[in-house]
Image (spheres, rainbow, N blue to C red):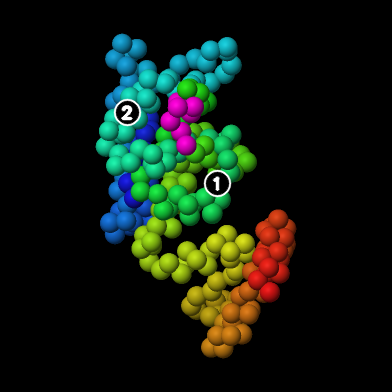
Amino acid sequence: MKVHIITPFPEMVNSIVESSILGKARERGCVEYQIYNLFDFSDKSSNKRIDDYPFGGGSGMILKPEPIFEAFKFIEKGLHDTNSARVIYPTPDGKLLNQDLSYELSRIDEIVIINGHYKGIDQRVRDSMVTDELSIGDYVLTGGELAGMVILDSIVRLIPDAINSKESADLDSFSQPLLDGPHYTRPSNYKDMKTPEILLSGNHKEIEKWFREKREEKTKLRRPDLWEKYKQLKEGSR
Ligand code: 6GU
C-alpha cells in the first residue's frame, strides 16, 4: 500500500508514521508513506497563506482550496490507478469509522489522506476529490492530524504481514462483535493479586470457554448494541 498524506504539520505526521506499528509496517515493506507539506503548495501571491476567513461569516479559519488542489494534482500524477485510489478526509461530520471499513481500506493499493485543520477545508475540495469523509467518534479534536493518524493506524495494522501475528488482529475487539477479555502475564501472583487459576491449568478447552464468557459478560455490560449484533450472529450460525 502507498499512503500519501497532505498536511500543514509534516513533522508531526512524520514522527507518528516513523514510530509504532506504522513504522514497523514500513520496515516490513507492507506500506510506504509520502508526506506533503501543504505550505509547499501555497500560492506565492497570497503570501503563502493556506487558510482564510469563511464567506458568510462565522468563527475559525478555512483551508483555502488552491494549495490542496495543487498538492492533489501533484500526487495524482504519480498514482497507478486514479479510479481505485481512495481519498480520505478526516472530519467530525464524516461517516463513523468502524472495523469493517478499516478492513476494506486495508485492501486498497493507494490512499490519500487530506488532514484539514482549523475549522475545516473549502467545500469544493470535499466535493471534487474526497471519496471518504470519516469521523473517529462523537467528540471534537483540535485538528485532523490525530484523527487521520488514528484512521491510518487502524488500516495499516490489518494489511497482511504488517504486524507480527495476524491472529492478534483477528481476536481483537470488533473483529467479532465481542469486546476483548482480560489478559494476565507473569508473575502469576503479584502482591497477592492472583491470576485466575483456570489460566494456569493448561486445559485449553476450558480456558477458551472462560475467555468467551468474560468477553460476553463485558460486551453485555458495556456495549448493548454489540451484544444484540453478537446474539443475532450466534443464532444465524446455529
Ligand atoms: Cl476525523 N477530526 C476532528 N478534528 N475531530 C474529530 C474527528 C475528526 N473525529 C472525531 N472528532
For numbered disc 1, what is the local secondary structure?
A: loop
Judge depth for marks 2 and 1 and give the one in front.
2
Judge from the rendering whether residue 204 lies leftward or rightward of residue 220; answer left or right: left
Give how far across and how far down residue 51 sits, in percent: 43, 20
Label 2 near ligand 1 (CB < 8 Å) = no
Give how far across and how far down residue 177 sits, in percent: 62, 62
- The amino acid beneath tag 2 is Lys
- The amino acid beneath tag 1 is Leu
Find residue 139 and report its image quarter: top right
Judge from the rendering whether residue 36 lies leftward or rightward of residue 202; answer left or right: left
Q: Residue 97 carries which label?
A: 1
Badge 2 or badge 1: first in the primary sequence: 2
Judge from the rendering whether residue 139 lies leftward or rightward of residue 150; answer left or right: right
Query: Does residue 54 appear in this view?
Result: yes
Which of 70 and 208 lies nearest the eye of the viewer? 70
Q: Residue at 53%, 88% (x, y): give it.
A: 202
Give how far across and how far down residue 43 sits, in percent: 32, 16
Q: Residue at 29%, 25% (x, y): give it.
A: 40
Depicted 214 relative to depicted 53: above or below? below
Marks 1 and 2: in contact by CB < 8 Å?
Answer: no
Q: Disc 2 and disc 1: Cα gap in Å?
A: 27 Å
Depicted 121 relative to depicted 149: above or below? above
For numbered disc 2, what is the local secondary structure?
A: helix
Reply yes or no: does residue 127 show up in magenta: yes
Q: Bounds of the magenta span?
A: 125-131
Which of 21 and 98 lies nearest the eye of the viewer? 98
Query: Does residue 13 appear in this view?
Result: no
Give how far across and how far down residue 55 sits, in percent: 53, 12
Q: Which mark is residue 73?
A: 2
